[in-house]
Amino acid sequence: MPQTDRLPIDNVKIVSKSGASNTSTVDENAATSGSETREYLISDLSQEFGVTLRALRFYEDRGLISPRRIGTMRIYDARDRERLGVILKGKQLGFTLAEIQEMLAGDQGGSGRIDLRLSLDKIDEQIAHLEWQRAEVDSAIEELQAARRKLAGG
């Protein structure tokens, strides 16, 4: 079952059209000391993040994470772990994997934090999209509740 706790809103960088950035980090504990050399198996990340093995293999197929391979065994490093956290944050915010991949495209494996690069326009678009989805869900709930009341004789 997927992890139900919300991920902290870290690893999100807001980039203005001029290219200036404003990084907001809510959870400073996200960076763990000494984790740069730590390695993880697919089962470790699956359990830690509450995702399936299939999801991790899918993210690898899409080029979002790239574990080292020893035969059929996948070995993930701290960078893969951090990217997975960012991918899941992007999904939580309602972005598609294609959008997440585009936002992560600037990360070329260099040093520094991995983050989603969001423009104010992209944020506004996503808010509007999520509000539209919420209205659609609210409408469907109202319709189903009316049908239930009708069937229940009330």
Image: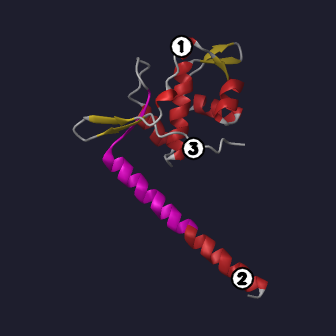
Instruction: Please report the residue visible at 45 percent of the width from the left and 58 percent of the height from the top.
Output: 129
Q: Which residue is mark 3?
A: 6
Q: Which of the two labelled residues, at mark 1 and mark 2, occupies the earlier sequence position?
A: 1
Magenta region, main secondary structure: helix
Q: How far apart are labels 3 and 1 at the CA level? A: 25 Å
Q: Amino acid at mark 2?
A: Arg
**Residue 54, quarter of picture:** top right
Q: Residue at x 27, y 41 (%)?
A: 16
Task: Return the residue at label 1.
Answer: 34
- Left or right: 107, with 145 as reference point: left
Q: Nearer the viewer, residue 20 or 106?
A: 20
Which residue appears at 68% of the width and 42% of the height? 2
Labelled pair 1, 2 in contact (Cβ < 8 Å): no
Residue 148, percent across and down?
72, 79
Is residue 27 a member of the stretch shown in magenta?
no
Mark earlier in primary sequence (3, 1): 3
Q: Quadrant of residue 84?
A: top right
Question: Quarter of the image containing the N terminus?
Answer: top right
- In the rendered view, would you say 111 is above or below 132? above
Amino acid beneath label 3: Arg
Disc 2: which residue: 149
Relative to 74, residue 127 above or below: below
C-alpha separation, residue under disc 3 versus residue under disc 2: 34 Å
Verify whether residue 129 appears in magenta.
Answer: yes
Mark 2 Cα shell of 10 Å, populated few (<14), some (14-19), many (≥20):
few
The crowding category of the residue bearing disc 1, from other C-alpha atoms within 10 Å (few below 14, some 14 to 19, many at least 20), is: few
Q: CA distance from mark 1 to mark 2?
A: 58 Å
Range shown magenta: 114-137
